[in-house]
Structure formats: C-alpha cells, structure tokens
Image (spheres, grey):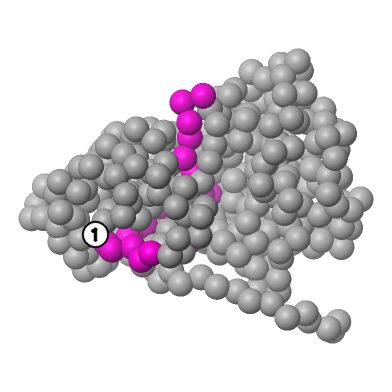
Amino acid sequence: MPPVNRFAFHNPVEVRFGRGVSADLGACLQLPALLVLGRATLERTGLADFAARTEGVHTHAGVPPNPTPDIIDAGATHARELGVRTIVGVGGGSAQDAAKCMAVMLGHSESIRDLQARCRAGEAFIRRVRLIQLPTTAGTGSEVTRWASVWGENGSKSSLDHESGYADVCLVDPALTDGMGAALTATTGLDAMAHAMEALWGVHHNPVSSLHARAALGLVSRHLLPCVRAGDAGIASAAAAATQRQRDGMALASLHAGLALSNTRSAVAHALSYALTGEHGVCHGAAVGLLCRGALPVNAALVPERVAAITDALGLPDVRAAQAFIDEVFVAAGLPTDLAGHGVPASALPALVDTACGAERLANNPGQLQPADLAAILEAIA
C-alpha cells in the first residue's frame, strides 16, 4: 500500500436510511415545524395528510426548480411569521436547498443575498432552528452537503455556503423514489454519478471521500439502468420486490455520492453546467451527465489513475465503455444524447466557455484547464 497523505473528512449530518424511515419524521421535529417542498411532492408523499393531522406542522408548498431569491425570501418570511423551530426540506435539490437557505436565514437575515454576502465574508454564526432533509429523488445528495444553490432571474447561479447548511438529520427513504418516471430517474441518477466522478478526479479527494465515491459508482452501474427501464411502467406487482431493491440501490448511491462530494466539492462538469441550466434550461442532471461524458477523456489524460478508479468502480474496461454507459442511460430514458437535442445550439458554446472560466468550481479540477480544454469538452457532446 502506498503512503497515505494527511487528510481530514468532516460531515456532521445524522443519516437514517431505509424503507419506511420517513415515518421517523414526527419524532425528529421540534414544533412548530414547516415542510418546504414542491406542490406535487406534497401530494405524492402523503405529507399533506401528515401535516393536516399533526398540530404545529405547516407546509410551504410550490418551491419551483432552481429557486430564486424572491422565492427563498418569501419562504423565510413565512417561517418567521409562524415562529418555527424546525424546517424540513422535502424533495429534490431545489426544495432541499431552499429549506437550507430559509433555516440559516432565520434569526440572522431577511434576505438571502445579504446572508450570502456575510457568509463570503467569513462571518461566524449558528443556525437557530432545526433542519431536517427528506429527499424524494435519488441523485442530489443535498441532504448531506453544506451548500445550497441560489439562482438569479437572469439564469446566473450562486451558492449559500456555510457550516450551518448541514442538516441535523436526513431521512433517506427509498420508498419515496418509487414513483419516479424514467426521465427523472435517469437525470437524478446521472447527477449522483457525476458527483461521484467529480469527487474521484477532483483535487481535494481523500481516502474516505474516494471510498464513498467508488461505492456510489458501483451501485449506479448495477441499479440505474434497471430503474430507468422500470420507471414509466411503475412498479408492477410481479416485479415489485426486485424493482424496490433497485430503487434502494440508487438511493444509497446518491447518499454515498453526496457524502463524497460534501468534502471534495465539484469540478469541471459542474462549472460548465450552470449556464446550461440557468440560460438554456437543460435539466441539471442531464447537463452534468453529458459533461462528465465529455470530460472523461480530458481528465484521463491529466489524472489517468483517478479516471481508472472511476471505470474500475463502474466495472467497465475503459473510458469509452464509461461513455457508452452514460449514453445508454440517456437512450433508455428517451432523452437526447447531445446538447443540440437539449436545445443548445453550437453558436452558444463560446459563451458557455467564457462563463465557466469564472466559475469557482473549475479550480477543483486537476490540470488548470484552459478555454481550449473546456471547448473540447463541449464540442464532444455538442
């Protein structure tokens, strides 16, 4: 075994995992509590009934994808008026990120933009309400990270990044993902895959983060395609147990990938993805899935041993096989396998490169990538 360099791994979130673990929610709450979620999630999860029959539990439904400051500020105002002691994020990354922002804001700021500025200035403060995360997709990993995405009206993306963004508890119940269709299963699963890949090739990888990332990729390779293929058909009674095991595997993959990324942060695929989502409307999971496909050969030339760890964890022989696996996921979900199919014209690529050059996450990639490298990644998936 080669020498192990000094490293640190930190994640304070209490993780509870397993089918039915969402039933622990009531016992985790300090009342009054506010559930932050999308309107469809409220009905699909049965939490509308839970809120209706539980005194002191309120809902803030209707959080849209990629929430903007006005959405977040309105939610924080609602929570402040109720005097809540617990905020619960229920859903994918958008709802969980909005919940993080609202929870950290209470008692400290009435504006998320003001709070972001204070965090960037290094101001120390402690979150004053309890934060619980309840993911309903298998991909975001937001339940175990400290940052939250905040989207501008012009499609720009920034983050709230503070130790207080870590949840007190996350309840990862794979049963809440059973109803996902093929496209949502594919894009959220590709998001988990991207988190694991970026954690492995990122400059801040360490032995513990790499263990989580490799575990995530192994689970993705075994379970993502079966989940996608079962997605739109739902869970037929004859295959219910088998399908549930596949969903369990993807929920665990997402958790492992989130734990890995919580310490390494993301890299080039995410740096390039923000404008694809904010300016061109490409779903985040689809964007980072395609970008990882494009970045694999670029990073293989820079850190061959790290990319070899990725293909090995996927159980695949080389980069081309890993790229083919990503394409197979897109095809199985009926999604385009190139940027043009997602509505991004070739004429947009230079601006995407320019935007990514200013992204903080780019510095986490090995090799000090130049604009020509970023252009090559985009051209490979155009």
**Is 324 left, or right, of 269 in this rendering?**
right
Is 144 part of what is drawn in magenta? yes
Q: Which x, y percent locates residue 201? A: 76, 57
Q: Residue at x 32, y 49 (%)?
A: 109
In this orientation, which residue lies closer to the viewer: 317 or 376? Answer: 376
Q: Residue at x 51, y 46 (%)?
A: 159
Q: Which x, y percent locates residue 270? A: 65, 43
Q: Is residue 214 visible?
A: no
Residue 5 sits above or below residue 200 on the image: below
Q: Which x, y percent locates residue 102? A: 32, 49
Task: Identify residue type, mark 1.
Answer: Thr
Magenta-highlighted residues: 125-154
Q: Quadrant of the C terminus?
A: top right
Q: Is residue 196 visible?
A: yes
Quarter of the image for residue 293 reads: top right
Mark 1 lies on residue: 86
In this orientation, which residue lies closer to the viewer: 31 or 83? Answer: 83
Residue 71 sits above or below residue 142 on the image: above
Q: Residue at x 40, y 71 (%)?
A: 14
Is 139 part of what is drawn in magenta? yes
